[in-house]
Amino acid sequence: MNLVDELDDFDGGSDYDYDGEGDGTGNEDLSADDKEQLQEGTAKVRSILGSEISITDKEIQDSLWHYYYDVEKTIAYLLSK
């Protein structure tokens, strides 16, 4: 399986079952370290991709989570969408 196949298999967290509690981001159960890594990673991805690409923070953070905070893999996935 290559990276493209893995990206095709990535569902973006569609199995997340929002129960109405918290802020709707799905970050309620994350450790402080995880939240910090997501914030930093989101900022890095946004700075690299720029404003011409329309993508939500949730999409970025779902991808960062899936790729264990790997910014390069996250960007590759988001650009392939």
Image (cartoon, rainbow, N blue to C red):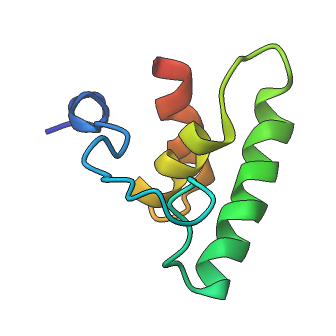
Q: Residue at x 54, y 29 (%)?
A: 78
Q: Position of residue 20 (x, y in %)?
A: 46, 56
Q: Position of residue 72 (x, y in %)?
A: 59, 46
Query: Closest to the observer: 23 or 42?
Result: 23
Q: Residue at x 71, y 18 (%)?
A: 54
- Taking 54 as reference, is 59 above or below it? below
Q: Residue furthest top?
A: 52
Quadrant of the snapshot with the N terminus: top left
Q: Can see residue 79?
A: yes
Query: Closest to the observer: 19 or 56?
Result: 19
Q: Position of residue 38 (x, y in %)?
A: 65, 63
Instruction: Tell me: 31 left or right of 55.
Output: left
- Taking 34 as reference, is 2 above or below it? above
Q: Residue at x 30, y 53 (%)?
A: 17
Q: Can see residue 67?
A: no
Q: Position of residue 2 (x, y in %)?
A: 22, 36
